[in-house]
């Protein structure tokens, strides 16, 4: 049994990853998370102290340990990485709109935090997988079939994507200059349970569930390449198990044919809601589309969720069934959006 350190494991993708990793590996998992507004210990409810399969599961008890801390804390990273065999790095400031209001937090966590982690990995020789985004490549024109590949030049648009691009470059430099054992994945837009209500899909679902209209930025012609969070995480597990050190893998589920307007219309259809157009995001990226053929070809990975309507229906059901998980933060998020006319 090894030890896996998961940074940002109390966030959306990280907490879903911890749940999946418990089912697929025998590793003990240490989660390190600062618990910013986006981190929620309730996302790990039942997983800590051996509760993942109920109190009676003797052999699996104590497999998840939670440590509250900042990844930019070099001393803490050194201590935690020292006992880890594998590090899976999800921790980040993740929301583009916030990066337009307060870029400093993004530089701190995404760049300085990744640097502190890399130095600890260099010192102790753990295997690192760095989680990144398709946004590092910039955007593609609407109405074409172009896709991002692993060799598309970096061209980030927002402070968020620029800091993620910076973190990718740091990882690559530490691989080449210091020989650390690391892989990188760049994934498209995730959706699914435990996603913060600031993000597009949960915002619209919870708007409608609270009697508000869904809110579409600008014309809604922009296109995102939606992937279910479990498909992202199964790809990460495949890379951890079979990926080649030093390599980058694109992750996407071939869903880049749906505009934001079409996604909102689908959500309205599933919930009986309505939508309105609101102020556009400054510098709004037009289209993302991932070519994930390397991952499919080399690692045999396949997505499980290939029908967006079905994935969205499951997600709507989750938000209906977990009102207590999101209702406490909903009004605050909407108040903040209202300040930018969104
Ligand atoms: P999230 O905002 O839901 O979670 C981020 C987590 O990181 C939170 O638990 C937060 O408390 C923690 N965190 C933030 N700053 C920290 C710090 N300084 N030290 C320790 N913990 C800190 O984000 P998410 O959507 O789950 O994204 C996770 C990762 O996946 C990020 O690296 C993001 O760039 C990447 N990613 C996200 C998507 C997406 O669609 N959401 C797609 C591709 C890649
Ligand atoms: O592409 C991967 C990226 O996807 C990740 O790296 C980011 O962490 C993640 O937040 C996401 O970034 P986006 O900016 O694409 O996601 P967001 O959910 O904020 O918005 C998705 C699209 O929907 C985008 O075109 C903006 C639009 N939008 C968003 C919100 C919140 C709306 O039309 N209305 C909204 O209310």
Image (spheres, rainbow, N blue to C red):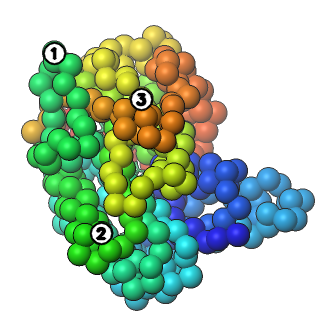
Q: Quadrant of residue 111?
A: bottom left
Residue at 59% x, 44% y is 324
- Foreground of the two, 305 or 149: 149
Mark 1 lies on a secondary structure that is loop
The residue under the point 38% across, 24% down is: 254
Viewer-nearest residue: 206 or 173: 173
Q: What label does residue 38 carry, if any?
A: none
Sooner in the amino-acid sequence: mark 3 or mark 2: 2
Q: Which residue is mark 3?
A: 253
Q: In the displayed structure, does residue 271 sit left or right of residue 295? A: right
- In percent of width and height, residue 311 lies at 52, 24
Is the residue 214 above or below the residue 15 in the image? above
| Position of residue 279 in the picture relative to residue 294 (left or right) | left
Question: How far apart are labels 1 and 3 at the CA level?
Answer: 19 Å
Mark 1 vs 3, N-terminal side: 1
Q: Residues within 10 Å of mark 1 (few under 14, many from 20)?
A: few
Callout 2 secondary element? helix
Q: Cβ(mark 1) to ligand 2 < 8 Å?
A: no
Answer yes or no: do the residues labelled 1 and 3 have beta carbons within 8 Å? no
Q: Is residue 206 left or right of residue 104?
A: right
Q: Is residue 130 visible?
A: no
Q: Which residue is mark 1?
A: 143
In the image, 46: left or right of 97?
A: right
Figure quarter occupied by ligand 2: top left
For label 2, the residue is 175
Residue shown at the point (47%, 75%) measured from the top left: 126
Q: Earlier in the sequence, mark 1 or mark 2?
A: 1
Residue 317 is situated, as x and y percent measured from the top left of the image, at: 60, 26
Which percent across, then down, holds residue 227? Answer: 43, 32
Q: Are marks 3 and 2 in contact (CB under 8 Å)?
A: no
Q: Counting other residues with Cα less than 10 Å from the Cα at mark 3, is it few (<14), some (14-19), or many (20 or more)?
A: many
């Amino acid at each position: 049994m090894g030890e896996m350190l998961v940074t940002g494991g109390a966030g959306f993708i990280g907490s879903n990853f911890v749940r999946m990793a418990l089912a697929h590996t025998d590793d003990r998992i240490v989660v390190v998370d600062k618990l910013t507004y986006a981190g929620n210990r309730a996302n790990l409810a039942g997983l800590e102290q051996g509760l993942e399969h109920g109190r009676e599961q003797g052999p699996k008890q104590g497999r998840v340990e939670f440590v509250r801390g900042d990844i930019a804390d070099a001393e803490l990273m050194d201590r935690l990485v020292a006992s880890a065999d594998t590090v899976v790095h999800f921790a980040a400031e993740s929301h583009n709109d916030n990066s337009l209001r307060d870029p400093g937090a993004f530089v701190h966590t995404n760049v300085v935090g990744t640097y502190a982690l890399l130095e600890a990995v260099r010192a102790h020789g753990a295997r690192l997988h760095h989680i990144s985004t398709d946004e590092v490549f910039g955007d593609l024109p609407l109405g074409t079939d172009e896709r991002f590949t692993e060799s598309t030049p970096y061209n980030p648009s927002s402070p968020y994507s620029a800091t993620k691009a910076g973190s990718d470059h740091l990882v690559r430099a530490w691989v080449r200059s210091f020989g650390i054992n690391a892989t990188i994945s760049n994934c498209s837009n995730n959706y699914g349970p435990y996603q913060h209500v600031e993000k597009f899909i949960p915002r619209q679902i919870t708007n409608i569930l609270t009697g508000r209209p869904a809110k579409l930025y600008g014309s809604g012609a922009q296109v995102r390449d939606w992937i279910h969070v479990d498909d992202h995480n199964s790809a990460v597990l495949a890379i951890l198990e079979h990926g080649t050190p030093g390599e980058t893998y694109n992750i996407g589920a071939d869903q880049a044919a749906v505009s934001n307007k079409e996604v909102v219309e689908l959500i309205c259809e599933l919930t009986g809601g309505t939508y309105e157009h609101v102020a556009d995001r400054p510098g709004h990226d037009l289209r993302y589309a991932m070519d994930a053929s390397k991952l499919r070809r080399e690692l045999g990975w396949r997505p499980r969720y290939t029908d967006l309507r079905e994935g969205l229906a499951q997600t709507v059901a989750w938000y209906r069934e977990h009102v207590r998980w999101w209702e406490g933060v909903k009004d605050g998020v909407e108040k903040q959006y209202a300040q930018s006319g969104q």
